[in-house]
Image (cartoon, helix red, strand yellow):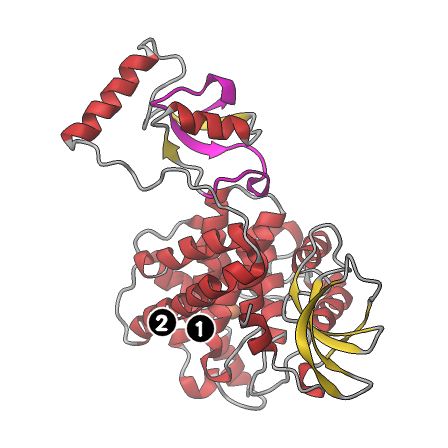
Amino acid sequence: MIRKLSTDRLRVGMYVHALVGSWMNHPFWRTRFLIRSETEIAKILDAGIEDVYIDISKGLDDQESRGVEEARREIESEIVAGVAVPEPEVPTIARRVSVAEELATARRIHGQAQQAIRGMMSEVRLGRAISVDMVEPAVEAITGSLARNSSALLGMLGIKNKDDYTFQHSVSVGTLLMAFGRTLGLPEDELREIGLGGMLHDVGKMKVPDAVLNKPGRLTDEEYAVIKRHPVDGHAILVETRGVGEVPLEITLHHHERFNGRGYPDGLSGESISRFSRMAAIVDVYDAITADRCYHKAMLATEALRRMWEWSANDFDRSLLQAFMKCIGIYPVGTVVRLESGVIGVVVEQNEESVLTPKVKAVFHSKSLRQLPPSVIDLARSGDKIASTESPERWPVDVVSHLTVA
Ligand SMILES: [Fe+2]
């Protein structure tokens, strides 16, 4: 049973179910935990959180008559007696770090998440049952990385390998949905649910024969009809999968619905499509058109967002698309830009104050046509400005190496 409580009434022994307010504004990346010490209460108060939800079925009730000291002693003695093992869900401060500090971790998390999805999908291909435990640790790790510095992991999403599209796309959609949800201020439990939904949304594609799924060139009407079954097939798989909640089920079933009602499988329109599925539709299309596929070249992030904005009168929820554009930024990490001075560089870090002045690693000069010794230009402090975004193929710039070498 959940009850809202003002933070100053928190006591040791209460179980925090959620912290009220946008989790971007506080330092905890776990919001469900048993309060075991006054220090934990002090951390919550210090973070400026005014209200919390407590779960009185898991901890003390605020109206309970027993003394606080008694509750604390009870918890301590349970721990000592080994009755209650301290839960791992102690609030962990998600210390903000720089992109450079987070990159190596983000790269590992990105790789592991892809492995997890690959493993899960191959079980589906073999017709075996899957479990949510196969991907939940990846969602957890992504949550932590986004909280420490979202630019690092979001930058990783641009590094794609043509062969593994379905796995990469699943990880990208999960990660982008979580980042998007954070900018909308969704509570942490919903962020995890949409992250899981994003990771699982295309699981039904494992029922599509490989020859159709990865066919270069145009699909026949029959083949397209087979592809279009994947939301319903995916939903059916996940209904049978223990531990999958309503949100991932909904995202899987309805991520191809379109705002104008021309999507599938149910032809829903407008707000009869859930907000989570409207978000998933945006993220799904954005990731698909920014990836190189056998039948099209990748579009630059800015171009993709511009095109989606043009299409959006029909396809997407415009207010959500606007929020997504804000989340991605005008110059996402990994974008190759040309500065007014002629310097070609790679965006390595966003500036939280202004989307127009990220940090750029200078690597080449477009006028002298020479490589530059890599150095980071902070456009917030430099007189230089971004003149244009550039296709990475136009210049001898290895985006990956400049992203991953701090
Ligand atoms: Fe899909």
Query: In front: 323, or 208?
Result: 323
Identify the image quadrant of residue 66.
Answer: top left
**Residue count near mark 2 (Cα–Cα under 10 Å), binned few <14, some 14–19, many ≥20:** many
Q: Which residue sits at x=53%, y=80%?
A: 224
Q: Position of residue 205 (x, y in %)?
A: 43, 74
Residue 252, compared with residue 118, is above or below; it is: above
Viewer-nearest residue: 192 or 107: 107
Residue sitting at x 52%, y 26%: 45
Q: Nearer the viewer, residue 82 or 285?
A: 82
Question: Circle 1 is placed at which residue position?
Answer: 167
Q: Is residue 10 magenta?
A: yes
Q: Amino acid at mark 2?
A: Met
Q: What residue span does the magenta drawing correspond to?
A: 1-29
Image coordinates of residue 126 in percent, x first then y, are 28, 76
**Residue placed at 57% from the left, 65% from the top?**
256
Is residue 166 placed above or below 155 in the rendered structure? below
Q: Is 91 rendered above or below residue 210?
A: above
The span from disc 2 to disc 1 (Cα, nearest Å) is 8 Å
Residue 270 vs residue 337, the one in the foreground:
337
Q: Secondary structure at mark 2?
A: helix
Image spot of residue 69 (x, y percent): 31, 13
What residue type is disc 1 on?
Phe
- Using residue 71 as the reference point, say whether residue 359 is left or right of it: right
Residue most toward the bottom? 217
Whether residue 157 is visible here, answered yes or no, is no
Q: Are marks 2 and 1 in contact (CB under 8 Å)?
A: yes
In percent of width and height, residue 322 lies at 72, 55
Residue under numbered circle 2: 121
